[in-house]
Image: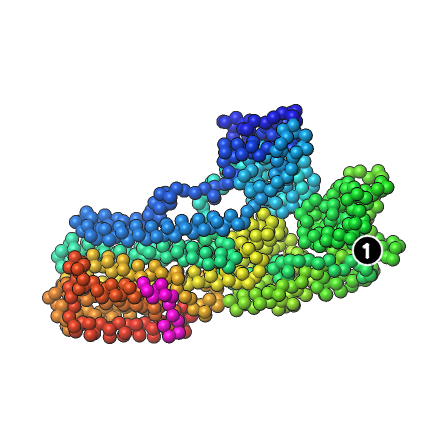
């Protein structure tokens, strides 16, 4: 292809060509032909060309970002099993002439779904705004102002990942996520992880050479795929396909909507289906009993339908959504961004936090403190070599490189950018744990300069510099060298070894084998001071039942020093080499007691997390580096920071805008508040519904008439649900927040079986008062009105007893919104019998004797419930 060719605004891809066919064709092309096929150039597209392609093809996003329309999302909420069942009951009411009952049932379902939809929509919009604060960008070549292709006007710009289009020329470096399916144009020791596509953990090398067209797509040696991670090296690449046309996008399309449910989701679903099964047993039973005993089968049917509605927790989806949305917004106020709402519950359930050391326990502000020779004596030569290595490396510059490059006087002394010329580079990778540059001096001589982890650099050294002379490194020198490093480590320094090798004039080609026969020059020692807030954060997390374990690639001495300063006790330490020698069961047992894991590679970090999960722990992992990607995905809650590399941010569920464990502590508290308030509604609904079931069964057998009119049952249920809509705002007791919370179906069962009969007991007391004291034996409307009032007031007021393990109001006060809604519903209930609405609902005024005894019934019910609740709390720890 002539580089001066002017590309059109559309890639030259046949409309009927499959994505894989295009991929194979571009892979088989040489570099010039590949650029021609995508109608691009080595210098990149212009901004106008890219904008036109973006308009035509669409953003570079995959299935998980696709949004259904508002109507479709609302209808999906209405299509839940619970909602469909209730709507079916409304149809039965309407078909039997009970229009009011049908309207009330349908209104409750639509109201619940509408409120849930509004809250979900609001939380989605808020989440989008929050996610916009965490952007993944790509280095893209733009050739604005010059279509000649000579590259003079080409420059690299950082663009959002979703703006990438076919034909773009992008730059890849260590730590980056491959933004699309790309054809490698040029590379230097490029290794990528394709685990996101193939599950294969071993890195794959990518080269620029054309490959045969018959190679399977995922085995193409010159194509890197969207979602893969650059582990080492660098490259320039041509974008072939974006979004849903990529291999990753096609997999995402197939898996869209198949997100695994959390334990809380599963628990909520179990509760809903439990109530549905109870309804399927209760409704026919109530129908048959009332039909046979009273002879009015139509009224029996309507009553049974109303009972079914009363048993249904129709507000549960709305309560869950409101709580999760409120929790996400509250966490955002504390600089914690929730990428996935359901992760909030896992944050509250987390009982072990695994974290990297750098930047979490330390200040993430590395200072180069010492530069010494092998005897520990200050050496400017070590600093000079280290500076040249950091200055000329093109990979991801970490904090250590930044600290070295701050020595500007060394730059001026060496004249690094004029007196030296870079010849080649051997990039860092996690196997070698070192990197090298080859530079040429002004006199033409060349030198390889290597720096990296002490053990790995020493492994390729055969001699060392000592006071200007070269000494051979023998086995007995290891102890002396080790003492210098050990002393630095114990003082809290992170030590990097620096070595070099003068190169022969005929040595031209360089690969990792060139790192052999090196001369150890000395060490540079960095100090990453512990954070002032780290000790407080660790104490706070311990207070809330979260154990902190450190998983790091650093050595034991340095990490122990940091742990000592932040108050993290270290009794058992596991090394990466030890972990490889253990089977899964043994590792799980030892990981339970270890608090420090050192010299770990990415796969070992993920294995430690799986081992802890196998012991029943809910694991959070906090990391921000390329080596944290696997651990973040393996953990129950992946936590990263806004400044993290792309793979860490994309793998995380939670993003911290400040790298501070105290912010995470706030997230843990919010997660437990969310879980607590949802659990309150479930526990109260279960016990209330079970008690109502026992009361309805008994009343159906004992009374010659219906204990409550169907429309009254529906209206009672509606008013009670309205009183619960403010539960999301309620306070949660401090002792509830102190330990991790998970779904506990046993405690819900105990509450239902213990507290439900108490509710039913006082219903029967009310029945006796109405029958024998108020003369309701021959007045069905009087009986129905009296039970309606007692039922509404008791279940609305008992919320204040069951919402806390403490003594309500005296030791634990409800939130003002909850207090106002419950008080408002009680006052409305008291007003209804004498209101203009009373006759329409079948209510009649109650006699004075009833009003005198009702407070005694309510006080007795609330007092006995408080007593049983306190016993359950002491006996089973129920909160």
Is 818 contained in the magenta span? yes
Asked if residue 828 is positioned above or below residue 503 in the image, the reply reads below
Q: Position of residue 354 (x, y in %)?
A: 57, 59
Asked if residue 225 is positioned above or below residue 650 in the image, the reply reads above
Q: Residue 266 falls in which quadrant of the image?
A: bottom left
- The residue sitting at the right extreme is 469
Find the magenta span and give its range.
809-821
Q: Is residue 240 visible?
A: no
Asked if residue 562 is positioned above or below residue 417 in the image, the reply reads below
Q: Position of residue 682 (x, y in %)?
A: 36, 61
**Quadrant of the snapshot with the N terminus:** top right
Q: Residue 34 falls in which quadrant of the image?
A: top right
In this picture, residue 653 sits left or right of residue 792: right
Q: Is residue 725 visible?
A: yes
Q: Secondary structure at mark 1?
A: helix
Asked if residue 520 is positioned above or below residue 685 in the image, the reply reads above
Q: Residue at x 59, y 62 (%)?
A: 549
For disc 1, the neighbor class at 10 Å (few under 14, some 14 to 19, many from 20) is few
Q: Position of residue 427 (x, y in %)?
A: 71, 45
Query: What colouring method underlies this structural image?
Result: rainbow
Q: Which residue is mark 1?
A: 380
Q: Position of residue 738 (x, y in %)?
A: 48, 68
- The residue sitting at the front extreme is 145
Q: Residue at x 17, y 49 (%)?
A: 96
In this picture, residue 48 sits left or right of residue 718: right
């Amino acid at each position: 292809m002539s580089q001066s060719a002017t590309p059109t605004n559309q890639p030259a891809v046949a409309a009927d060509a499959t994505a894989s066919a295009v991929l194979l064709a571009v892979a088989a092309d040489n570099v010039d032909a590949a650029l021609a096929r995508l109608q691009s150039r080595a210098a990149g597209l212009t901004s106008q060309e890219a904008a036109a392609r973006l308009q035509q093809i669409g953003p570079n996003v995959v299935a998980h970002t696709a949004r259904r329309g508002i109507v479709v999302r609302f209808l999906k909420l209405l299509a839940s099993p619970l909602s469909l069942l209730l709507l079916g009951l409304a149809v039965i009411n309407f078909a039997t002439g009970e229009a009011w009952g049908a309207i009330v049932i349908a209104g409750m379902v639509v109201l619940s779904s509408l409120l849930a939809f509004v809250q979900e929509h609001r939380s989605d919009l808020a989440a989008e705004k929050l996610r916009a604060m965490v952007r993944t960008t790509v280095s893209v070549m733009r050739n604005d102002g010059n279509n000649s292709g000579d590259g003079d006007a080409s420059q690299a710009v950082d663009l959002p990942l979703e703006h990438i289009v076919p034909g773009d020329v992008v730059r890849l470096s260590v730590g980056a996520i491959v933004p699309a399916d790309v054809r490698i144009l040029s590379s230097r020791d490029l290794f990528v992880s394709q685990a996101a596509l193939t599950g294969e953990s071993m890195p794959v090398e990518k080269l620029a050479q054309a490959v045969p067209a018959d190679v399977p797509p995922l085995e193409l040696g010159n194509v890197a795929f969207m979602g893969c991670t650059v582990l080492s090296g660098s490259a320039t690449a041509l974008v072939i396909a974006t979004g849903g046309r990529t291999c990753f996008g096609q997999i995402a399309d197939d898996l869209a909507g198949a997100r695994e449910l959390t334990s809380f989701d599963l628990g909520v679903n179990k509760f809903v289906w439990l109530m549905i099964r109870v309804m399927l047993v209760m409704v026919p039973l109530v129908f048959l009993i009332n039909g046979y005993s009273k002879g009015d089968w139509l009224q029996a049917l309507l009553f049974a339908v109303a009972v079914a509605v009363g048993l249904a927790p129709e507000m549960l989806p709305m309560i869950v959504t409101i709580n999760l949305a409120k929790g996400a917004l509250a966490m955002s106020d504390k600089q914690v961004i929730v990428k996935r709402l359901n992760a909030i519950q896992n944050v509250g359930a987390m009982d072990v936090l695994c974290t990297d050391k750098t930047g979490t326990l330390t200040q993430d502000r590395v200072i180069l403190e010492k530069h010494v020779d092998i005897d520990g004596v200050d050496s400017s030569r070590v600093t000079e070599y280290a500076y040249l290595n950091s200055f000329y490396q093109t990979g991801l510059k970490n904090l250590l490189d930044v600290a070295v490059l701050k020595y500007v006087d060394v730059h001026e002394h060496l004249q690094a950018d004029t007196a030296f010329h870079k010849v080649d580079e051997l990039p860092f990778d996690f196997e070698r744990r070192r990197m090298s540059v080859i530079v040429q001096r002004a006199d033409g001589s060349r030198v390889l300069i290597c720096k990296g982890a002490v053990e790995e650099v020493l492994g390729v050294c055969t001699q060392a510099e000592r006071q200007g002379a070269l000494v051979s490194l023998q086995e007995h020198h290891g102890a002396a060298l080790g003492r210098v490093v050990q002393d630095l480590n114990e003082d809290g320094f992170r030590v990097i070894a620096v070595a070099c090798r003068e190169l022969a004039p005929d040595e031209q080609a360089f690969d990792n084998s060139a790192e052999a026969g090196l001369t150890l020059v000395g060490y540079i020692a960095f100090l990453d001071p512990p954070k002032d807030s780290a000790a407080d954060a660790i104490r706070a997390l311990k207070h809330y039942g979260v154990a902190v374990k450190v998983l790091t690639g650093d050595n034991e001495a340095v990490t122990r020093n940091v742990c000592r300063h932040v108050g993290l006790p270290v009794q058992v330490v596991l090394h990466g080499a030890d972990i490889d020698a253990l089977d899964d069961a043994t590792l799980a047992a030892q990981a339970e007691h270890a608090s420090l894991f050192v010299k770990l590679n990415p796969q070992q970090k993920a294995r430690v997390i799986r081992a802890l999960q196998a012991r029943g722990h809910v694991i959070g992992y906090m990391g921000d580096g390329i080596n944290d990607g696997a651990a973040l995905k393996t953990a129950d809650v992946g936590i990263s920071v806004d400044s993290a590399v792309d793979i860490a941010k994309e793998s995380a569920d939670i993003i911290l805008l400040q790298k501070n464990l105290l912010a995470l502590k706030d997230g843990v508290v919010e997660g437990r508040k969310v879980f607590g308030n949802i659990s309150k509604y479930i526990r109260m609904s279960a016990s209330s519904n079970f008690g109502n079931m026992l009361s309805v069964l008994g009343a159906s057998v004992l009374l010659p008439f219906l204990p409550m009119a169907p429309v009254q049952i529906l209206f009672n249920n509606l008013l009670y649900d309205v009183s619960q809509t403010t539960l999301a705002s309620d306070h949660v007791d401090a002792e509830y927040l102190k330990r991790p919370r998970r779904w506990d179906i046993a405690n819900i069962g105990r509450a239902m079986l213990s507290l439900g009969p108490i509710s039913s007991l006082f219903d029967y007391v009310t029945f006796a008062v109405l029958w024998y004291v108020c003369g309701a034996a021959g007045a069905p409307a009087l009986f129905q009105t009296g039970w309606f009032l007692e039922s509404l007031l008791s279940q609305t007021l008992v919320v204040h007893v069951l919402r806390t393990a403490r003594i309500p109001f005296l030791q634990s006060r409800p939130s003002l919104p909850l207090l106002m809604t419950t008080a408002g519903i009680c006052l409305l209930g008291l007003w209804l019998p004498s209101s203009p609405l009373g006759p329409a609902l079948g209510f009649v005024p109650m006699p004075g004797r009833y009003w005198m005894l009702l407070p005694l019934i309510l006080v007795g019910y609330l007092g006995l419930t408080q007593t049983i609740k306190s016993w359950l709390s002491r006996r089973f720890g129920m909160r």
